[in-house]
C-alpha cells in the first residue's frame, strides 16, 4: 500500500532515487552533501520498484527498502518512501514526482538526485520535458567519471532544459553497490563501506552470497561463451572480467559494464580466420590492409558486432570497449582503458616481459599503464615483423601528448 506523507511544511525537498542494492556510505554522503549545498529541508530516499530500464529481482525489493531505512534512520533530515516499491507495474520518475507534488505546497522546490550516468539517459525517460519542468536534477558522479563526454552531455541537457541540471562530483561515491555485492560474494570485508547496520543485515540474511549477484543475462553470456571458446580462452575471459571489475572499483567506472565488456571482449577470438573474414563481410566491417593481412586482429571489432547481435548488448560504451580492446584508439574512454589493461594483466596470463611493470602501474595510473602496454606491444610486434595497426600508434601518441600537456 502506498504510504505518502504530507510535505507541506517544507520549502525544498530532494528525492534520492536509485536501486540501492545495497545502499552504501557513498549514497549517504552524496545525499547529505547535496542537502547542505542546496539548502534542502528533507531528503526522501526512494528505492526503485520495477525500473523501466532493467529486470529487477522482486525478492530484493523488501531487502533494499529495509536496508535503506536502516542506513538513513540516524539522520533527522532523511526519510525513506515505499512509493515506488509499492507501485504496481513499471516505475517512472514522472509518476513519482507527480504524486509527491500533490503532497507539497505549490511553491515547494523539488530536486531529484541520482547517478550522473542515469541522468545522461534522461531523454529516453518518460516525458523528460515535463519532468524537468517539475523538478531540478542533481547528477552525482564518482571521482574520475567527470570526463569530457559527461560534461558535454550535461551541458547540452542544461542548455536544452534551461539549466535545471547540476553536476556534482562526490569523492565518497567511489564506493559502488556492484563492488559491495562482489565483495560479499568473494568473502571480502564491506566494513566502513556501508553503515554497520546494513553490514549486519546483509550477513544476517545471507544476501549477495550466491548467484543473486549474477543476473540471468550474465549466466546466459557465460553459457554461450563456454560453448564457443576454448577452455583456455574461456578462463582468460573470466580473468579479464574479474580484473576489469577490480579496476572499475579502483577508478570509479561502472562495474557492471566493465564486467560484461571483460567477459565478452574475446567472444569472436576462437573463430577461424576464414570465419572472421566472412563475418566481417556480413557485418559490413571495412577492413584496411593490415586487418586483411592479419585477420585475427579483426576479432575485437567483430566481437563488438557479435556482442550486439548475438548477446544482446546495446550499450555503446561496452561495445566500444570490446571493439578497441586490441588496438586501442585516441581518446579512449575510461571503460576502454580498463578492458584494454584488464586483458593485458589478468591473473591467468602466462608471464611475458614487461607484464609486472604494467600490473604495478594498472592500479596507480591507468594512463601510464596503457602507454607502457602499447609500447611493449608495438615493440613486440615489430620484432615479430608484424605490421602495426595505426590505431595503436595513434592511441600511444595521443596519451603521450596528454601526459606532456599535463606536465606543462
Ligand atoms: P542504478 O542502476 O541504481 O544506478 C546507476 C548508476 O548511478 C550506478 O553507478 C549507481 O551507483 C549510481 N546511482 C544510482 N542512484 C544513485 C544515487 N541516488 N546517488 C548516487 N549514485 C547513484 O539506477 P537507475 O536504475 O539507473 O535509476 C536511477 C534513478 O533514475 C531511479 O530513481 C530510477 O527510477 C530513475 N530512472 C527513471 C527512468 C524513467 O522514469 N523512465 C529511467 C531510468 C531511471 P550504485 O550502484 O553504487 O548505486
Image (cartoon, grey):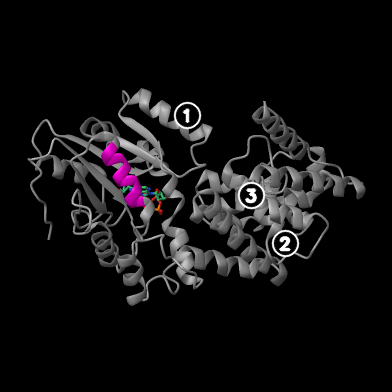
Res 137 → quadrant: top left
Q: Is residue 356 visible?
A: yes
| Residue at numbered disc 3 | 364
User: Residue 156: percent from the left, percent from the top?
Assistant: 41, 26
Quarter of the picture holding the C terminus: top right
Q: Earlier in the sequence, mark 3 or mark 2?
A: 2
Element at badge 2?
A: loop
Instruction: Please state if 259 lies on the left or on the right of 212 as rendered.
Output: right
Closer to us: 189 or 229: 189
Magenta range:
27-36
User: Residue 280: percent from the left, percent from the top?
Assistant: 70, 47
- Label 1 vs label 3: CA separation? 27 Å
Is the Cβ of the residue at disc 1 closer than 8 Å to that at disc 3?
no
- Dot 1 alpha-carbon crowd within 10 angstroms: few under 14, some 14 to 19, many 20 or more: few
| Predominant secondary structure, magenta span | helix
- Dot 3 alpha-carbon crowd within 10 angstroms: few under 14, some 14 to 19, many 20 or more: few
Res 375 → quadrant: top right
Of circles 1 and 3, which is in front? 3
Q: Earlier in the sequence, mark 1 or mark 3?
A: 1
- The residue at 30%/42% (across/down) is 113
Instruction: Please state if 118 lies on the left or on the right of 94 as rendered.
Output: right
| Residue at numbered disc 1 | 152
Of circles 3 and 2, which is in front? 3
* Rendered position, 184 above or below 6: below
| Residue at numbered disc 2 | 270
- The residue at 67%/69% (across/down) is 235
Closer to us: 350 or 191: 191
Instruction: Please state if 120 lies on the left or on the right of 297 as rendered.
Output: left
User: Residue 11: percent from the left, percent from the top?
Assistant: 13, 35
User: Residue 365: percent from the left, percent from the top?
Assistant: 64, 46
- The residue at 68%/56% (across/down) is 343
- Dot 2 alpha-carbon crowd within 10 angstroms: few under 14, some 14 to 19, many 20 or more: some
Amino acid at each position: 500500500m502506498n504510504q505518502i506523507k504530507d510535505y507541506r511544511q517544507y520549502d525544498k525537498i530532494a528525492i534520492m532515487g536509485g536501486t540501492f542494492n545495497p545502499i552504501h556510505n557513498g549514497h549517504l554522503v552524496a545525499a547529505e552533501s547535496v542537502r547542505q549545498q542546496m539548502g534542502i529541508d528533507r531528503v526522501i530516499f526512494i528505492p526503485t520498484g520495477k525500473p523501466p530500464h532493467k529486470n529487477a529481482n522482486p525478492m530484493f525489493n523488501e531487502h533494499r527498502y529495509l536496508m535503506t531505512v536502516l542506513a538513513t534512520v540516524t539522520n533527522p533530515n532523511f526519510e525513506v518512501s515505499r512509493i515506488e516499491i509499492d507501485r504496481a507495474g513499471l516505475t517512472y520518475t514522472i509518476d513519482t514526482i507527480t504524486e509527491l507534488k500533490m503532497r507539497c505546497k505549490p511553491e515547494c522546490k523539488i530536486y531529484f538526485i541520482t547517478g550522473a550516468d542515469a541522468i545522461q539517459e534522461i531523454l529516453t525517460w518518460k516525458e523528460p520535458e515535463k519532468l524537468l519542468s517539475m523538478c531540478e536534477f542533481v547528477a552525482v558522479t564518482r571521482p574520475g567519471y567527470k570526463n569530457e563526454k559527461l560534461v558535454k552531455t550535461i551541458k547540452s541537457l542544461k542548455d536544452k532544459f534551461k539549466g535545471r541540471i547540476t553536476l556534482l562530483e562526490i569523492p565518497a561515491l567511489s564506493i559502488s553497490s556492484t563492488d559491495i555485492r562482489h565483495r560479499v560474494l568473494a568473502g571480502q570485508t564491506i566494513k566502513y563501506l556501508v553503515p554497520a547496520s546494513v553490514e549486519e543485515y546483509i550477513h544476517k540474511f545471507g544476501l549477495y552470497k550466491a548467484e543473486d549477484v549474477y543476473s540471468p543475462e550474465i549466466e546466459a553470456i557465460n553459457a554461450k561463451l563456454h560453448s564457443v571458446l576454448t577452455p583456455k580462452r574461456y578462463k582468460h575471459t573470466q580473468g579479464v572480467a574479474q580484473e576489469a571489475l577490480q579496476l572499475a572499483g579502483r577508478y570509479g567506472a561502472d562495474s557492471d559494464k566493465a564486467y560484461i565488456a571483460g567477459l565478452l571482449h574475446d567472444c569472436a577470438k576462437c573463430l577461424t580466420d576464414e570465419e572472421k573474414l566472412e563475418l566481417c563481410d556480413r557485418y559490413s566491417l571495412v577492413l584496411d590492409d593490415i586487418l586483411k593481412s592479419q585477420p585475427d586482429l579483426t576479432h575485437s571489432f567483430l566481437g563488438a558486432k557479435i556482442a550486439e547481435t548475438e548477446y544482446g548488448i546495446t550499450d555503446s560504451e561496452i561495445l566500444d570497449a570490446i571493439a578497441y580492446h586490441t588496438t586501442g584508439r585516441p581518446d579512449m574512454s575510461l571503460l576502454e582503458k580498463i578492458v584494454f589493461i584488464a586483458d593485458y594483466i589478468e591473473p591467468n596470463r602466462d608471464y611475458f616481459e614487461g607484464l609486472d611493470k604494467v600490473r604495478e602501474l594498472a592500479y596507480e595510473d591507468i594512463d601510464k599503464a596503457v602507454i607502457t602496454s602499447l609500447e611493449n606491444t608495438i615493440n613486440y610486434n615489430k620484432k615479430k615483423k608484424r605490421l602495426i595497426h595505426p590505431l595503436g600508434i595513434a592511441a600511444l601518441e595521443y596519451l603521450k601528448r596528454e601526459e606532456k600537456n599535463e606536465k606543462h
